[in-house]
Image (tube, rainbow, N blue to C red):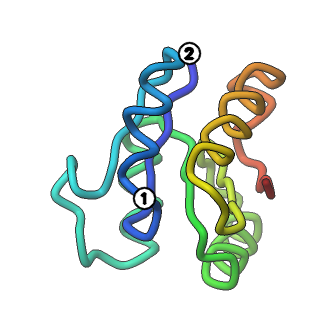
Amino acid sequence: MISLYTDEDVDVLIKPLLNAKGLTVFTTLDEGMLGRSDQEQLEHATKLRCVFLTHNRIHFEELYKNLLKENKEHYGIIIAGRRNIYGLASRIARLFELHTVENIKNNLWYI
């Protein structure tokens, strides 16, 4: 089963929307991680074995490049354009329907 960890810039409404679709979602608020660095957020998501969801393209593209250089594992990063939260929830659920944990792991996805 794929779990998701959301960056603090993602609307917390995503959690109940995806929970209703049977997905497990952790938020920075739930985890007491508000205000932590992007690096810390990603490390926490990895510790939880979660795919990371953010709208922060520039910072997370850089973090992803660094992970590749350092050959570090993570459970995947999704960079989502800012859009209607209901549409975003549908796109994420669809991504998780079409791909396995192993397929998403260590990759960068744009939706």
Whether residue 9 sits left or right of residue 56 in the image: it is left
Q: Position of residue 58 (x, y in %)?
A: 68, 84
**Rendered residue at 21%/50% (across/down):** 31
Q: Earlier in the sequence, mark 1 or mark 2?
A: 2
Q: In the picture shown, does residue 36 fall above or below 106?
A: below
Q: Quadrant of residue 100?
A: top right
Q: Position of residue 84 (x, y in %)?
A: 62, 56
Residue that label 2 marks? 1
- The disc at residue 11 is 1
**Rendered residue at 71%/59% (across/down):** 71
Q: Amino acid at mark 1?
A: Asp
**Rendered residue at 60%/76% (across/down):** 56
Q: In the picture shown, does residue 89 fall above or below 43?
A: above
Label 1 with label 2: CB-CB less than 8 Å: no
Q: Amino acid at mark 2?
A: Met
Q: Position of residue 89 (x, y in %)?
A: 60, 40
Question: On the rendered image, what quadrant is the N terminus found in?
Answer: top right
